[in-house]
Amino acid sequence: MNNSLASTISDFLKMHSPFSNLSVDELETISLSISVLSLDKNETLFKIGDELHNKFYVVASGLMHISLIADAEETLIDKPSVGEVFGLRPFFAKNNYATTAKAIQDSIIYAIPVAVFKPIIAKNTVVLDFLLQNFASSSSDTSENLGGNQSTDGGKSYETPNEIQFFQALEYNKNPLLVSGDETIQNVAQKMTDSLLGCALVHHQNIPLGIVTDVDLRKKVATGRFYITALTNKIMSAPVITVPENTSLAEAQLLMLQNNITHLCVTVDGTDKTAIVGVISQQDLIFAQASNPGVLIKEIKRAPNSAELHNIRLKFEEFIQNSIQKKIPLSHIHTIAGEVNNALIKRAIDLVILDLGSPPVRFSWFSIGSQGRKEQLLFTDQNSFLVYEDVAFDKNQIVKDYFLRLANKVVEILEKVGYSANSNKYTASNPEYCKSFSEWSEQFSGWILKPGDKSNEISTLFFDYEIAYGSIEIEEQLNDVVFDRLENAKKFLAYLGAETLKRPAPLTFFKQFNIEEEGIHKELFDIKNRAILHLVDAARVLILSHKVKGINNTFLRFKQLAMIEPKYAEIYLNAAEAFVVLAKIRTKEGLKNNSNGQYILLEELSKSDREKLKNALAPMRELEEIIKNKFQLTYFM
């Protein structure tokens, strides 16, 4: 690769995590090793069952869809866009791909050799942490993605902790299989099979001597190098790598990467001179990172009714609270919450279809608003719309009646789960928002070409859509319509910009918080309308002006804008951080008061949170100036 191209790639990578944590020399080494791939729309990079590549990937341009087969249904679990990594399985698992990666747009992909990157993450725990979280959060069902059953090497399922355990000591098998080096390979292999374990520790008086894994059996015995009648000490790996009992996930993963192994022996003091107390497997690491959301999603899929779904959603509130207390990045919590919310919606729809019978045509259920942006952590309003395939005119009413019955029942179930149907009725149960594809195409075209016909809620809700259930093809076709119309939509973008500037000010002329002066929320601060939605609206209109698909989340929109418009990068990055601060304060207050967190009694905030809240309002004035200049808002003023 020529140095000019490598330099361009290096400049791109250093703007994105985890590459922003690397040195100049490390970035240069990586950039020189990268292969540049060009994928056409709908072209597959890898699919379920393919052998693992010796590379992982970064989206340089375009958009990918990562999907898996769950319960005989193809499920979208991730949508990597520009700057995001995917295909990390070669780092953390040994079996074949459990997902399919397909380009949804013409895309340019950077392929990074795993062998080049491994030495870097072996000495950089920040990068390792990022990759682990990314892999776990994009693996919707961890046990299926690892290609095994729900048990780890200890034969137990991690279904109890209500927290992300990445920053804690690991759970591991405390009853490992112990064998003697004088036993035959056949005898040890039989014990491993009977115990459903992937390894056996070779010991003498409970002191570790070595380890035999299923990999050893495949490579050394199945290939004919050793007979099954040979002694186990002939094929064991020695010395075994040992760790103490309080080893963290990051420490364990680092040792596995450094030594290219899949198991660690836990001893009393972490050396091979003291007694064995357990074994940590590679699967334990992945379960520790993402088991809890994965278990909740499994429970959701099995839930027989709305009452059980409500109980699961309450469990997830505990997860959110614990995650915030442990300072888990809010962007990570939002990602997981989005998957759990989607799983609840999917199960509600599945339950209704079981009752009503199969749909007459294909359809898609879209979440909009905070659910569509994957920013919903609390029990707030549900917002949605439904699109079904076009049918002959004489059949349209019959088909629509079916989907309206379905939507009404789904909305009822979700209300029982805890998501109230909003007072404005922006839900698929409203006939106005349950329509055929052609009708929706006309609707979005009208909103874009004739702005101002509807209130600001339209732009707030319907242009932050995310498919929650149904046909991905319908979503792609809808994207094509919307972004085609945006090519000549200066008036529409100016309208959105003007509406953004109409939001009520968060501070008074004297820089004091603008609290409610009357009504049931008197003397409370409306953090949603006076703060958060300023940032949400600004990010939306700015990202739409650049025709960027696939990025709905406000935090990620500002991050993307910082790359697209470098001269405003500092403002956009400050806005991204401000959004995180505001969302965290709202979530903490909502959990504390069992509310949606919209209205806050400022006197109850800590001095630190009050200061953070005021500082988070600072980027809003600069965003207003950008919007005024960019969209020439005198047209509407």
Image: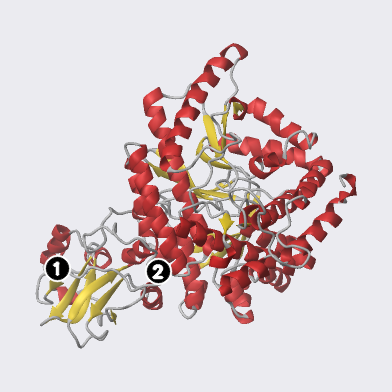
Badge 1 element: helix
Q: How many marks?
A: 2
Badge 2 element: loop
- Type of amino acid at the residue the image marks with label 2: Phe
Q: Nearer the viewer, residue 100 or 595?
A: 595
Q: Nearer the viewer, residue 458 or 390?
A: 458
Percent coordinates x, y for residue 464 in the rendering: 63, 45
Percent coordinates x, y for residue 52 in the rendering: 43, 58
Q: Quadrant of residue 440?
A: top right
Residue beneath disc 1: 185
Chosen colour scheme: secondary structure
- Residue at the extreme bottom: 273
Residue beneath disc 2: 166
Q: In percent of the image, x 13 and y 67: which residue is there?
A: 188
Q: Quadrant of the N terminus?
A: bottom right
Q: Are marks 1 and 2 in contact (CB under 8 Å)?
A: no
